[in-house]
Image (spheres, rainbow, N blue to C red):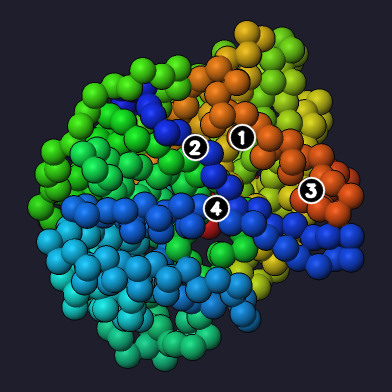
Amino acid sequence: MPEGLSFSGAVHTAADVSFLSDMTWVDAEGAQHNSQQIFDTAFEMIRNARHLVLLDMFLYNDFQMGVSSPKRPLSRQLTDLLLQQKQAYPDIRIIVITDPINTVYGSVPCGAFAELSAADIDVVITDLDQLRDSNPAYSFFWRLFLRRLGNSTRGRLPNPFDPRSKVTLRSYLATLNFKGNHRKVIVTDHEDSLVGLVSSANPHDASCANTNVACKFSGAAVNEILATENSVLKFCGQTPLTFTANTSEPASDVTVQVLTEGAIKSAALNLINNMQRDEHLNLAFFFLADRDVIKALKNAASRGVRLRVLLDPNKDSFGQAKHGIPNRPVAAELVSSGIEVRWSHTHGEQCHQKMLLGVNNKKQAKLLLGSSNMTRRNLDDFNLETNILIRAPLSAPVLTDALTHFDYLWHNRPDQVFSVAYEHYRDESVLKRGFYRFMEATGFSTF
């Protein structure tokens, strides 16, 4: 594993910490509505920057992926804004780090990336070969025989992500490595300091209706995000960033800790394992599959911790029907242990948030959120991931807003339906449980 990954940062006080969310719901007539804060805030951060903009985003493209008419062209909006900022401030340093999935592993040129590069904006495609293999049985064969074949832009096979282009067989073969740079962070300068945003949201057109969460903050912790991104730049053969910023610790009862890769799992397990009887633990996830996390949740329930788990039903993926794995067999296991589970009431979009919120009996709270799902691939040092752990009194606005967000999704309102009862997507299939356990254990899966 490259140096600088699986990073557990220091606990820093932070200023201007705010919780952000994107939400989609249906009204009493079944019409879909949404409210979006995350990229509105991200775009404002970029507009305020004068010296530095760094983005590390997993999905950054206009692929339709089965969605006929995305409600918001996020990738175009972001590209235009970066170009405008570079034109207005020619000396500003803008770096975009992203995953090769956006070029379908080299067979579909990305027009946005070409525009950015032409404007002297650095675009770095993550070298996934430097990462550990999450699907080792296949990746051994890939590294030995297939990687040397490279790729080309003369594909003839259907693009699995967008019907408007073709890909090569080699792109399909590369996909089966099931690894990626899954981070979703933005760092910008503002006056003499840095501002950071850690999110579960992508600037990806087909994902614009997804429910997501994020936190924006300033303070010394943002410098550590920059350090973790420098680690990626280094193993991709790029020059690390240097930026002198105010690193003073503001007087605050809110702290932020930066976590990446395997350090996220340690923090999640520590949070769950320290919860006691009658304390409250709320989870909202796109994928929940990691066996250590599930065991910890079941043990917490047996201690009398009050758990609420909100999951995506895993029925849709960009216009394609899915089989409910892993969340439906996992939900059945949790419910059998007395844990309350509800499903996000999706209509083609996804409950894409990744959030764990614990509140103890002294009204002190911890909020863990970011890019990482609770799966082996996300937590065991395979994918690149970035989360933050916020510690604060529950009365702090960032924690109050996070809990209000969760309650809003959990309870619904007469004219706003966000979630449905467990029975709505209940699935206790032994076959699906077996498939899930095999896929999670071997890495031969998309989650």
- How far apart, in angstroms, are the residues tagged by discs 4 and 3? 20 Å
Q: Earlier in the sequence, mark 3 or mark 1?
A: 1
Given the image, on which type of amino acid does mark 2 rest? Ser
Q: Secondary structure beneath disc 4?
A: loop
Q: Secondary structure beneath disc 3?
A: strand
Report the residue marked by disc 3.
419
Task: Indicate whether 55 appears above or below 147.
Answer: above
Determine which of the numbered discs, if any, sits on residue 18 in the image. Answer: 2
Report the residue marked by disc 4.
37
Task: Indicate whether 178 appears above or below 303.
Answer: below
Report the residue marked by disc 1.
401
Q: Secondary structure beneath disc 1?
A: helix
Residue 23 percent location from the top left of the image: 65, 53
Describe residue 42's horizontal placement relative to residue 405 as left or right.
Answer: left
Quarter of the figure that contains the N terminus: top left
Given the image, on which type of amino acid does mark 3 rest? Ser
Residue 423 percent location from the top left of the image: 88, 46
